[in-house]
Structures are given as C-alpha cells and as structure tokens.
Image: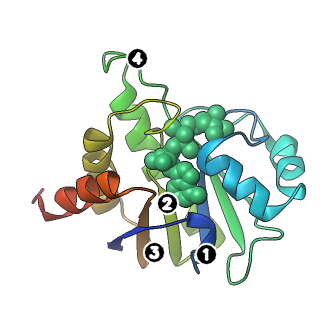
C-alpha cells in the first residue's frame, strides 16, 4: 500500500516521478490544474494528448512530461466526473480515477506520484466527499507506488484531505 502524503501547493513544483492532471476527454488542456500542467510541460503535452485522446471519465493515460522540471518524467491525465448532484454514479467515477492513476503509474514504473483534488474545481465535486474517496481508494488499491502525494491548492481542501487520512477505513 502506498504511503499517502497531503501537501498544499502548485503541483507543477512537485519533485515526483509522475504528476497527475485533472483533464478533460480531449487531453488538450484547459484551465485549473490542467492549465498549469500544460503551461509547465509546454505545447508538446497537448500534442501527445491529442494523439491518444479521447480519455473517458474515470480512466487515466500517461504521456511524457516534456518541459516539466526533472525528475518528473510522466504526466498521468485522468478525467473526473462532472458533479450532477451525486445520483449519476459520480462517486464511482471519481474512485475509478484514483484507481486507474495507480494502475497507470504501475505500468510506467512510477514510484512517487503527485495527485490534485480531481473534479473538485470546474467539475464541482464536493471537496469533502472527494477527499474521502481519494484516501479510501488509494488505501484499497494494490500498487507498487510508494508515495502518493495528494496536493491541495487551498487550505480548505488540505483540511478535508487530512481529515480523510485520520478517518479509519
Ligand atoms: N496545483 C494543484 N492543484 C491545483 C492547481 C495547481 N497548480 N490549480 C488548480 N488546482 C486545484 C483546484 O483548486 C481544484 O482543487 O485542482 C483541483 C481540481 O480543479 P480543476 O483543475 O478545475 O479540475 P476539475 O474540477 O477536475 O475540472 C476539470 O477543468 O481545467 C479544466 O481541462 C480541465 O475540462 C477539465 C476540467
């Protein structure tokens, strides 16, 4: 089981093997964390994404990290669910994002992975519930990843992630 860390910061500054971005199905980039990752990785990231798009909600795919500073070698793109009130299976799709991220990380041999609060921005997923899903899914997914660093962009999200960590299964 991976060790779970919670930090606050800009995910593009994390020194890990793979940085996860909260993408959309086109993998062409967008706003939020996806915008930040694409800006840091450079235009080749969108070209690599376009070559393997679409990525379905709940799935994840890896590309090189291009201009991201070392040691980041990979970007793992995952597409979260758009929050529609909670009755459309959004929680299962979000859990699938975290599970697929770990599976893709295993496939590329990444041992340290930084993950943003997927779907809790533009896609509107409630951050407290999303934090619980993130922690529970990482804890329950067999993986060779040694460290999963959950990167919050604000104190509120960090609080929810920390609270989720202290909640036993
Ligand atoms: N580092 C870490 N986290 C960040 C950063 C950053 N540089 N920038 C934003 N975030 C946080 C947001 O504050 C939020 O908590 O990432 C979380 C996810 O929010 P979004 O980036 O809006 O992602 P999401 O809700 O999954 O929406 C995805 O938005 O940017 C587009 O192309 C993307 O269409 C897709 C949609």
Q: What element carries label 3?
A: loop
Q: Name the residue under label 3.
A: 144
Front in this rendered view, residue 13 or 143: 13
| First in residue order: circle 4 vs circle 2 | 4
Q: Residues within 10 Å of mark 4 (few under 14, many from 20)?
A: few
Q: Mark 4 points at which residue?
A: 84
Instruction: Confirm or deny contact between disc 3 and disc 1 (CB under 8 A).
Output: yes
Residue 43 seen anywhere in this rendered image of the structure? yes
Q: What element carries label 2?
A: strand
- x, y (%) of residue 47? 90, 48
Residue 109: assigned label: 1
Q: Quadrant of the N terminus?
A: bottom left
Instruction: Confirm or deny contact between disc 3 and disc 4 (CB under 8 A).
Output: no
The answer for how far apart the CA atoms under marks 3 and 1 are is: 8 Å
Q: Residue at 72% across / 83% down in the picture?
A: 70
* Vertical comparison of 146 with 82: above or below: below
* Vertical comparison of 92 with 15: above or below: above
The answer for how far apart the CA atoms under marks 1 and 2 are is: 16 Å
The answer for how far apart the CA atoms under marks 3 and 2 are is: 16 Å
| First in residue order: circle 1 vs circle 2 | 1
């Amino acid at each position: 089981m991976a060790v779970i860390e919670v930090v606050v910061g800009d995910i593009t500054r994390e020194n890990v093997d793979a940085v996860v971005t909260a993408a959309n199905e086109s993998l062409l980039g967008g706003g939020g964390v996806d915008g930040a990752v694409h800006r840091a990785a450079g235009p080749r990231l969108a070209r690599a994404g376009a070559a393997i798009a679409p990525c379905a909600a709940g799935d994840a795919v890896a590309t090189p990290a291009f201009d991201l500073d070392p040691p980041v070698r990979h970007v793992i793109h995952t597409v979260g669910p758009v929050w529609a009130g909670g009755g459309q299976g959004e929680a299962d799709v979000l859990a699938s994002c975290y599970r697929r991220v770990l599976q893709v990380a295993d496939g590329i041999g990444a041992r340290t992975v930084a993950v943003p609060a997927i779907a809790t921005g533009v896609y509107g997923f409630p951050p407290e519930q999303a934090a619980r899903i993130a922690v529970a899914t990482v804890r329950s997914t067999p993986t060779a990843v040694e460290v999963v660093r959950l990167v919050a962009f604000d104190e509120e999200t960090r609080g929810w992630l920390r609270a989720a960590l202290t909640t036993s299964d």
